[in-house]
Image: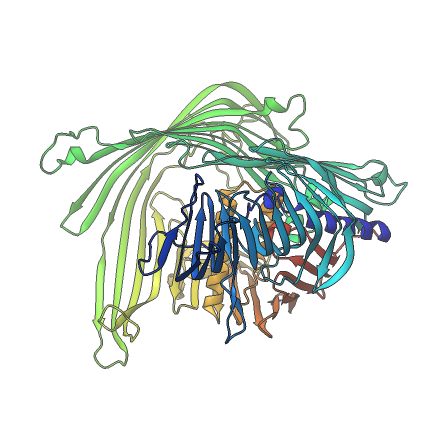
Amino acid sequence: MKLLKSSILLISVILLTLGVGKANAFSGFSLQQIIQQDTSKKDTTKKTGKNTSTLDQKVEYKADSVRMNKSTGVIYMYGNARVIYGDFELDADYIKYDSEKKVIFASGREDPKTKRYTGRPIFKSGADGSAIADSLYYNSETTRAKVFGVFSEQEGGFFSGGQSKKQVDDELHIKNVMYSTCNLPHPHFGMMISKGIVTEKQIITGPVYMIIEDVPTFLGLPFAFFPKPNKRTSGVILPTPGEDATRGFFLQNGGYYLGLNDYWDAKLLGTIYTNGSYETNLASTYTKRYKFNGNIALNYASVKNGLEGTEAFKNPNKDFSIRWSHSQNANAKPGTTFSASVNLTSSSYYVNTAAGASYDPSAIARNTTNSSISYAKAFTNGMNFTLAATSNQTLSTKDISLRLPDATFNVPTFSPFDSKTRTGEQKWYQKITVGYAVQGTNSIDTKDSLLFANDGLKRLRSGFAHSIPINMSFTALKYLNFSLGGTYNEYWNFQTINNRYTTFPDNTYTIRTDTISGFKRAGSYNLSTSMSTKIYGKKVFNNLGNIKALRHVMTPTVSLNYSPDFQKEGNGPYRIARDQNNREILDANNQQLLYSTFQGMAQPGSFSGKTASIGFGLDNTVELKVKSSKDTTGTGERKIPIIQGFTINGNYNFLATIHKLSNLSFSGRSQFTDKLGINYNGNFDPYALDFDQTTGIYTKSDTYTWKRGSLPRLTSIGFSFDYSLNPEALKKKNEANDKLTEVANKKGLSPLQSEQLAAISRDPNAFVDFNVPWNFSFSYSFQYTNDLGVSNVSNTVNFNGDLNLTPKWKVTFTSGFDFKNKGLVPPVLGIYRDLHCWDLSVGWTPSGAYKSYSVTLKVKASILQDLKLSKRQNFYYEYQ
């Protein structure tokens, strides 16, 4: 197996290195432009002239200094020399043109002070890109050319050295030309093409071999033939050999690539294991420029677990995964959008396949998946319509919830009593606004194993929900903002439930629920009014150092809400629970037991008991004004936000039988410096606790805490913050992740690429910037809860950083501290070496459940992203 792995690696390196460049890289001077010469402006101080040749196309030239030998017809051009012949353009420090032989020679010159060779020829032919060379000959009559020491770029690869000879039929002969992804004139590594012939449709070479640091290696081929199609081509994908502790040795992701056309392609891949497990994958990427792009992946796996001869081994797990991503260009159809993000899997797919053989711990531990396909249409009058299909899976419980589909239609609020031709201020009735929204749902909640059963679709639930909000806003007493209104809700269901209760002598009962088909409707409404204003406070300090002033802005809000009782039989979908003898059933509090016939249906609705409540809230913002020498406004002052959005909310229900006052919740944030910001939240309970000496259990009383001489109970509080000692490093990392996300949105990434992008965003060591010499940052979160006398505290701290040991060596680390278990989170250490055109990285997790190490050497260029050598020891789950 080691021999097989080494052989495949050797062949892969050779084929990848030879095959990455497009074949037309060698076609007649078809090279990407490196240096652009500005010829839009003519220098009248330079000598110019034209050849009086009788050819249809004349040779134009100019230079800082021009000398002509009339007897031989040779023209010598020195300094910024330029020659144009038809579509052939040439710039160099020195050019010699023999008008009799029609031969142009160009070269650079050696600087006598620095001894550096400068002013190399830069040439271009037709619409092809430019190239640079040490020297060249060009026959303007036959269009033949001979180039020495060419250096040019072609889609991430570089060609340098050797000789190139262009024939009359555009056939190109090359000799001792180096191909590499290293952008230096003298590359660190590359493939040496000793001899080759390049035609319009093919490349034929003699011996080719790899050179590393000027040392020839044994990696090579005696000859090679490459076709030059101008479209995607199909081909075999070599598998990756390896070993899995549970499934044995494997050949992974081998198969065939189908270059179907310029708009879509496909890959058919497979993986086989020596214990009999196998996986198949069909992946396709499609794109239509300026229209849409996306990708789809279908995976199926048969995984044998356990030891040979056991039932688990004889009956392999069958797992599947369906992933589809589609996005539409915003300008393709203005007003209309279509998007898809589908991720449907069997409940054990991520565990059994090690997240598709990625061994990503976060993916293996994934417990939920979500999918959505949506279509939206916005009309010119403001109305909009959406149609969506969604799914939510809980993998641990195998529950799946589908909405097939959800349809919504919204009418923006309008003023039915106002006139478009009105002049002057609105009258009170013209301020009334009305809106409308309707949502249709077709849903099913079941187990994934029952979804495709014979009666699976019979579990679908259908219904509509209508909402009509009515509102009127006005200002009173100049500073008070009032709002009056209400909302009417109408719910339609095409299925309802009927509960049948059976009571027993010991006062216990059982419930049997029947689903009944048929149309049922119910409505509810509520009325509300609210008032808000702003209160400003300011304190100026004259003798408090750099602090000049303190500004406090308060926004109090008060609201009144009323809703009748919709939980009475006959007022809504509620029914009184009755047993087999038609007797009413009482709950634990000896109250009449009610149940909703809409429970579990597509539109369960919101039907509250009778409420008349007052809500209150207070939002606070506090700012300091201090002296600042960095202020650019000229005032020499700047504002520091001490408290941002500190809000307190609560409500009081006058009609509630107990606990009329709700909990008092608060939340806010404070940004003290550019490096430190804190978010905080919490709850206060205004009711005291009673302790039962017999049971030892706390119960919530109906007595306020202040009546017992204490403040409201703090039932929960939490805060979190991030801090970076080098905010510039954090800024660059966020910018890099934003750029990756932007690229991902523009291109149709495969599901695997999307997962890799997410892993990069999660991993603090995945982004390595040698321009940032050091960085250290950490985050901390604290949460305290106290529920009926039982308190719980959780707090965690995570930290990461990196350090440049030298301009080319960087060390990174990430870890944390678990206060509950009083131990360090398993650390992850990394060492990176910048090898200019290569990257060397070492990753090490020395302890924990995911103990592993890896060593990777890879080429930086994206064109050779698969050309890498790696040694990895992953964590494995082993059967005991």
- In the picture provided, is 792 more to the left or to the right than 550? right
Residue at the (21%, 47%) spot, across then down:
481
Looking at the image, can residue 324 be seen? no
In this rendering, the answer to whether 599 lies above or below 177 is: above
Residue most toward the right? 309
> In x, y percent, where is residue 748?
54, 40
Residue most toward the front? 71
Name the one closer to the observer, 691 or 215. 215
Tag count in the figure? 0
> In x, y percent, where is residue 600?
53, 31
Residue at the (39%, 69%) spot, across then down:
673
Name the one closer to the observer, 322 or 212. 212
> In x, y percent, where is residue 675?
43, 68
Residue at the (72%, 65%) spot, across then down:
847
In this rendering, the answer to whether 473 lies above or below 177 is: above
Residue most toward the left? 424
In this rendering, the answer to whether 454 lies above or below 123 is: above
- In the picture provided, is 25 more to the left or to the right than 613? right
Name the one closer to the observer, 571 or 483. 483
> In x, y percent, where is residue 529?
26, 42
Name the one closer to the observer, 447 or 140. 140
